[in-house]
Amino acid sequence: MDRVNGSVPTPRSRAVTGQHPVDVVCLGESMVTFLPTRPGRLADVPSFDRGIGGAESNVACALAAAGHRARWVGRVGRDGFGTHLTEAIGAYGVDVSAVVRDPGRPTGVYFRTATDRATDAHEVVYHRAGSAASAMAPSTVPYDVVAGGRILHLTGITAALSASCLALVRELTGPRPGRPLVSFDVNFRPGLWADPAAGGRVLLDLARGADVVFVGADEAEAAWGVGEPDAIRRALPEPGVLVVKRGEVGATVYERCAASFPTPPLPELGALPPDPRASNAGGAGFAAGPRPDTVTHVPAPRVDVVAPVGAGDAFAAGFLSGTLRGLDAKARLRHGHLMAAAALTVPGDLAAPARRAHADRLAAAPDEAWGRLHLGPGWTGEDQEVRTP
């Protein structure tokens, strides 16, 4: 198989070197997405705009745009769509040197309507069966490629693609000496699983092996039959950090060991207990033995939503950005909300985040001022006024 080399013809693509060549490695499928040029049923939409979509590559692009070193590990076809994906993702500053080009399988594509996926009017049509990404497996993804960063970010979508992809995610979330901090976004998509109930059980098992877990209250209810944050934590006590997202209500983080995230360069990362489940601890950086949670809730700011897609991935990127910077729980959640707000106020999956200084000023606002934030399209620009009625 061919690898995309470090000279992808885009102005910002890069390969990085060093003991920790990247801050975050994101592994998963990315697809070319076709977005309708107007609202309506897929049967009625006359034309589409081409974009890129993929939970893990979205996180990588958002982190790179926020100034972090990010690598996307994936598999695409040796076709024009695969070339477009690697060039477009590389243009965000993401290291795409580990992407594999598969000569026998195509790059996945999908079409969707402009409506919210939570509504009955939302339609999405995937052409991903037998895709290059579905051939990812422990034997086709060298461990040193995915373990070369401080954080490894995975999602439940990859686990649903094929038996070999599930085997890969199981291996990466399993205990291993020297494992990086493992971040896992549950991303339960019932339509991807032949048996959604069984898929929910698989995702619960995978999440138990991770260090940082993101899950929406709605998807936890659908996958596991529990929707209240405290009940979700009781169902998932193993991760050192659990983030429960509740849309407009906000997000809550359950953190067993606040000292798990020292300031950069995160020297503790890489020390994994022999069996994190037996010790009731997460992976890198978490002390063994049961500890009481520190629980922090941060409400979401008011946002004038343009399109809801990509917000969950952006939230994860904002939270992980704060993690890399050694910020406290409230700041990490606020940066998650701000990154999500950037995605919510643009039509596609990806948005340019606010500059770090701008986001830091908003994240440091007193609680009263934070509660008055009202973010609309264009709010990420330095010259845009953020409304606080």
Image (tube, rainbow, N blue to C red):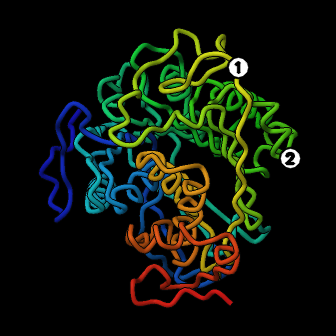
Crowdedness near tag 1: few (<14), some (14–19) or many (≥20) residues, C-alpha within 10 Å:
some
Mark 1: which secondary structure? loop
Residue plotted at (35% across, 30% down): 267
For residue 290, which numbered disc appears in the image?
Answer: 1
Tag 2: amino acid: Glu
Tag 1: amino acid: Pro
Task: Give the quarter of the image for residue 213.
Answer: top right
x, y percent for residue 290:
70, 20
x, y percent for residue 356:
39, 67
Q: Is residue 318 above or below residue 276?
A: below
Mark 2: which secondary structure? loop
Q: Is residue 139 above or below residue 358?
A: above
For residue 142, which numbered disc appears in the image?
Answer: none
Task: Give the quarter of the image for residue 49.
Answer: bottom left
Residue plotted at (50% across, 32% down): 182
Q: Is residue 120 left or right of residue 109?
A: right
Whichever of labels 2 and 1 marks the residue nearer the N terminus, that label is 2
Tell me the quadrant of the picture where the N terminus can be found.
top left
Return the residue nearer the eye: 379 or 56. Answer: 379
Front of the two marks 2 and 1: 1
Return the residue nearer the eye: 383 or 58. Answer: 383
Q: Is residue 297 above or below residue 2?
A: below
Residue plotted at (35% across, 45% down): 72
Residue 127 makes an appearance in the image: no
Return the residue nearer the eye: 176 or 115. Answer: 176
Instruction: Give the Cα separation between the discs numbered 2 and 1.
Output: 22 Å
x, y percent for residue 173:
53, 24
Report which residue position mark 2 lands on.
Answer: 228
